[in-house]
Image (spheres, rainbow, N blue to C red):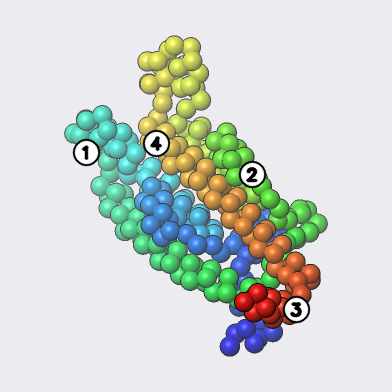
Amino acid sequence: MEQLKSESLRNLRRPKGYISVANVNLLHLKNPWVTAWWSAAFPGYGHIIMGSYVKGFLLVIWEFAINYEAHLNTAIYYSLLGRFQIAKDVIDINWFLLYVSVYIYAIWGSFRLTVDLNKLSILADREDSMIIPIKIGSMEICFLDKRVPWVSVMLSLFSPGLGHLYTHRIPTTLFLMANYITVVYYSHVLRAIHYTATGAFSQAAMILDPQWFLILPSLIGFSIYDAYVNTVEYNRLFEMEQARFLSDHYQMPNINSVLADCLGGAK
């Protein structure tokens, strides 16, 4: 029945993507277990993958604050070294028990959100809703075009956030860059790299702060993964918009009956 609705109503009800001067957000199928895994690696990342920025950013900020107060990463560091008693002594039980409930919610919430948005993505594909490929504002221009996924990977590897800037996700870009600068500064990783390059390994090990340093693997890994997936899906969105435009303006209206006649004549 919804196919009988006016196109403007269908586009409002089942949009496939949204383009603004600051961001491109879209619906596409995702594996719920993947988003749940990213939430387990770092609460908030699963929601950011799904385009739920407000919830994702809040959960990431919460993770930074509670993890730091509980000294969780420091305890993990000592546990990996087999120094379990020091790990028990360093962790703050009051903050750690506060950590658990929101951590579980982040995993469950991202899984449930993925399942729901996957359903909406399928409905949006069936509706064949219109996609506006360009948005021009006074400060910025945003448009869909074909981009190279591995370029976004390399940019994210150089600095988390650059891959998202390449795919025009400016809110995520600013947030990831702020996180990266904060982690690099407080972990003293650049100074540790400098000491390592000069052969002063003991100084490098002494100056490195494991509480902040252990955030880097998940931060960089998430930036690479999310930027790559965004680039691939943006390319698909671009192809969908092009296909719809060509079908609406250049395809014969009675193409289905013509094909049926041709196939019938061939028989």
Of tags 2 and 1, the one toward the viewer is: 2
- The amino acid pointed to by label 2 is Val
Task: Identify the mark nearer the N-term, 3 or 4.
Answer: 4
Task: Identify the mark nearer the N-term, 2 or 1.
Answer: 1
Left or right position of 262 against 89: right
Of tags 2 and 4, the one toward the viewer is: 2
Judge by depth and name the residue closer to the eye, 222 or 170.
Answer: 222
- Provide the residue designation for mark 2: 148
The 10 Å Cα crowd at callout 4, few under 14, some 14 to 19, many 20 or more, is some
| Residue 134 locus on image (x, y percent) | 75, 60
Which residue of the protein is positioned furthest toward the right in this rendering? 138
The 10 Å Cα crowd at callout 1, few under 14, some 14 to 19, many 20 or more, is some
- The amino acid pointed to by label 4 is Leu
Q: Is residue 256 visible?
A: no
Q: Classify mark 3: helix, strand or loop.
A: loop
Of tags 3 and 1, the one toward the viewer is: 3
Q: Classify mark 4: helix, strand or loop.
A: loop
Quarter holding the N terminus is bottom right
For the residues marked 3 and 1, what is the alpha-carbon distance in whole angstroms? 72 Å
Residue shown at 58% from the left, 70% from the top:
125
Residue shown at 20% from the left, 34% from the top:
84
Residue 88, numbered label: 1
- The amino acid pointed to by label 3 is Pro
| Residue 223 locus on image (x, y percent) | 52, 44
- Provide the residue designation for mark 3: 253
Residue 214, numbered label: 4
